[in-house]
Amino acid sequence: MKRTKVFYNVLILLAALLLTACQDQKDIPEVSSPEKNLVLSDHISNQKVKSICEDRYGQIWIGTFRGLNKYDGNQYHQYYCVDDSLGLPDNNITDIYRDSHNRLWVATVNGVCLYQANGNFNRVSINGSNKNIEKILEDKEGRIFFLTMTDLYQYDENTNTAIIKLSKMVEKNCYNYSCHIDRKDVMWIVTSYSVKGYRTQDLKLIVQSPVQSYPIASFLLDGHQLYISGYNGMQLFDTDTRKWGRPSENLIREANN
């Protein structure tokens, strides 16, 4: 009888420990072993979303202020910067880009990398001091570019290195800029003061035109219609004709609504 009582007490103790472990486990995301440094969760890693991209499998990648997330339709696969050269360069994600070869690039405030099928990240060596990559671009020839506030890098496939090709493209006292590559492989950098066009083949400046109002955002439509919005309304720059125009009344009406 005494042995039976001890047995029941042990069972109760084990049940209590198991219950406590289960309760604690709700707050701790499950770590998945197939992909290194991966965390599975029902929630996104951070609410400040900075970039969204769809991969070749239809999975949605979300870059946030703290961590990279892959949503497979059921769970968020979360990736973080760890003390490992095969991880992300930083947790602050700035851009995600899927190139013409279906490779997934991830830019951070401290470098850029390529996602690997095994869950690792192949970091790109950067030969400049500014590693805060804000934009990833690709032209029709498959050339990959990385843009920072001070420099434009071009990716060298042979050495896995980002090499500075342009510097000081943005004027002083300019804190807002954007960049697009048009259908003729001209890279357009929109700053607070001007629109500049560089041929991606040799990155030679071929066009420079002052903007009419302080730009806040820009969007390239149909490969040549560069819409620029600012405090004084919307402007349209045709990258084919290199001339300024006025957006259609319907577009302005929809934007105002």
Image (cartoon, helix red, strand yellow):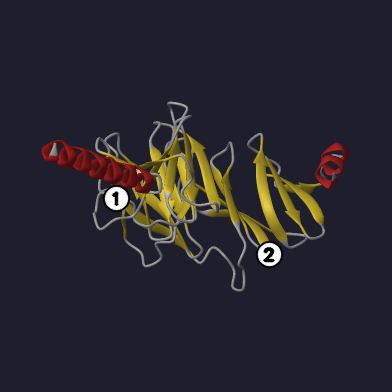
- SS for dot 2: loop
Q: On the rendered image, what quadrant is the N terminus found in?
A: top left
Q: Which residue in the protein does label 2 denote?
A: 193
Circle 1 or circle 2, nearest the eye:
1
**Extreme residue in the front direction:** 1
**Extreme residue in the bottom direction:** 173
Query: As rendered, which of 212 and 82 lies closer to the eye?
Result: 82
- Do labels 1 and 2 touch, CB within 8 Å? no
Q: How many marks?
A: 2
Dot 1 or dot 2: first in sequence order is 1
> Which amino acid type corresponds to the residue marked 2 in the rendered image?
Tyr
Left or right: residue 5 versus residue 224 is: left
Left or right: residue 74 versus residue 33 is: right
- Residue 36 visible: no
Q: Residue at x 19, y 42 (%)?
A: 10
Q: Residue at x 41, y 65 (%)?
A: 130
- Residue 148 visible: yes
Across and down, in percent, residue 80 comes to 36, 51
Q: On the rendered image, what quadrant is the C terminus found in?
A: top right
Q: Quadrant location of residue 220?
A: top right
Q: Which residue in the protein does label 1 denote?
A: 87
> Which amino acid type corresponds to the residue marked 1 in the rendered image?
Gly
Left or right: residue 26 versus residue 36 is: right
Q: Quadrant location of residue 81?
A: bottom left
Query: As rendered, which of 188 and 137 lies closer to the eye?
Result: 137
